[in-house]
Image (spheres, rainbow, N blue to C red):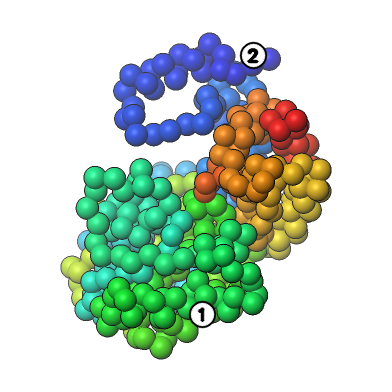
Amino acid sequence: MIEPPGPRAKEIIYRDGNVMSSCMSRPYPLVIDRARGATITDVEGKTYIDFVAGIAVMNVGHSNPEVSAAVTAQMEKMAHCAFTDFFADPPVRLAEKLTQLTGYDRLFLCNSGTESVEAAIKLAMWKLDRQSLIGFYGAFHGRTLGSLSLTCSSVKHKEHFPTIRVVHAHYGYCYRCPLHLKYPGCGIECARQIETLIFKKEISPKDIAAIVVEPILGEGGYIVPPPEFHQEIRRICDDNDILMVADEVQTGCYRTGTFMAMENFGVRADIVCMAKALGGGLPLGATLASSSIMDWPPGTHSNTFGGNLLASAASLAALQFMEREDIGTRAKQLGDYVMLRLREMQSKYPAIGDVRGLGLMIGIEIVKPEGSIDPDTRGRIVVEGFKEGIVLLPCGDSAIRFSPPLVITKAEADTGMDRFEEALKKSVC
């Protein structure tokens, strides 16, 4: 077996460097050829256990045969019909399935997470005739200008770009409370400051169209807030006639066990954004709301590829597969097991400062001996994991994410955890 990067990988990486935009960043030289289930194979034939799933996209597994069959059958008929100008059955069947799974009765189809957030922003602003938003420190909602205004995880994302008016509040990050308080005695002060500080000093609630929040902070570090955090956000929205928007782009489609992650917190948002795993591997996003909110007139918002027939067919097949296979229960059970394995490692390796997650959306925070963030060691662990045969990605200031395909087997998860421990050992010992 040729150790990566082999000659074929080096040749592709060289060509990539000649033609691709320099704005992309890759943490190690993995050149992918094919994948199935939770296993990735590179161009030299080496296999890896996938703990990334294309950034929480491939919930149904790579090369899922049911999704492949649905896309192939649709491709033989046609690929694109300009659904926002004409009518077709596949997007309607998909919409009917999503309304059944979520309880929302209207949706807008698009192509990505950032587009679904843009649609939510426009819908909230249109509905309430207000132009300002509240987001959260550490949030990631996309890189187009509306969603970028809400994104607040790295200044690199926003430098030199204009934004709409967004005021950011503290997220419920109990491991490193920005207010230096202790949960549960804190009274969820991070959320309460929206009313006690932001509304009094920075912006009137009468100017705010929506509070936009991730159920679990994704790119910001896979941070799970206490249940009362989202409940308090819901109360603030209700008391101040503000719409609550849940960005379920990374957390949706059973990633945390429930179809929408907000279900874990007993909270229902007014508008929901979905994408990533929704398309079964094809580009697809959706913005969902009730008909009383999503009642904007024709022409207010549209796009070219939303409701794409191939993406609709893939999504419907993926949703039917996940529901039939009870993939949410699987995510909870395997997630509990992976968390157990990681906590066992935490007891042996002080470099793991925190283990957190819901379902198979799990993060660990890498720290220095005194407890401060340690992005350098985090980076070494991610690269060593690649050498050991697992695919990992960082998130937040010092965290590593674990978001494998939800079809990963216990045996694969065990092997992956063994390889991760080897990578951890080589990086910190």
From the top left corner, tell me how far across and down residue 264 is, in percent: 61, 71
* Residue tagged 2: 2
Q: Quadrant of residue 94?
A: bottom left
171 left or right of 424 in image: left
43 left or right of 211 in image: right
Q: Residue at x 59, y 41 (%)?
A: 374
Label 2, label 1: how far apart the Cα atoms are = 54 Å
**On-image quarter of the N terminus:** top right
- The residue under label 2 is which amino acid type? Ile
Q: Quadrant of residue 104?
A: bottom left
State the residue in front, 219 or 50.
Answer: 219
From the top left corner, tell me how far across and down residue 80 is, in percent: 31, 49
- The residue under label 1 is which amino acid type? Glu
Q: Secondary structure at mark 1?
A: helix
Q: Is residue 2 visible?
A: yes
First in residue order: circle 2 vs circle 1? 2
Q: Is residue 293 visible?
A: no
Q: Residue furthest left?
A: 299
Q: Residue at x 39, y 22 (%)?
A: 16
For residue 365, above or below residue 105: above
From the top left corner, tell me how far across and down residue 172 is, in percent: 54, 67
Q: Residue furthest bottom?
A: 239
Q: Residue at x 47, y 43 (%)?
A: 72
From the top left corner, tell me how far across and down residue 213 is, in percent: 45, 67
For residue 404, above or below residue 327: above
Of the numbered discs in the image, which one, if any, rests on residue 325? none
Q: Residue at x 57, y 34 (%)?
A: 376
Of the numbered discs in the image, which one, if any, rests on residue 232? 1
Q: How many residues crowd around disc 2 within 10 Å: few (fewer than 14), some, or many (20 or more)?
A: few
401 left or right of 416 in image: left
6 left or right of 89 in image: right
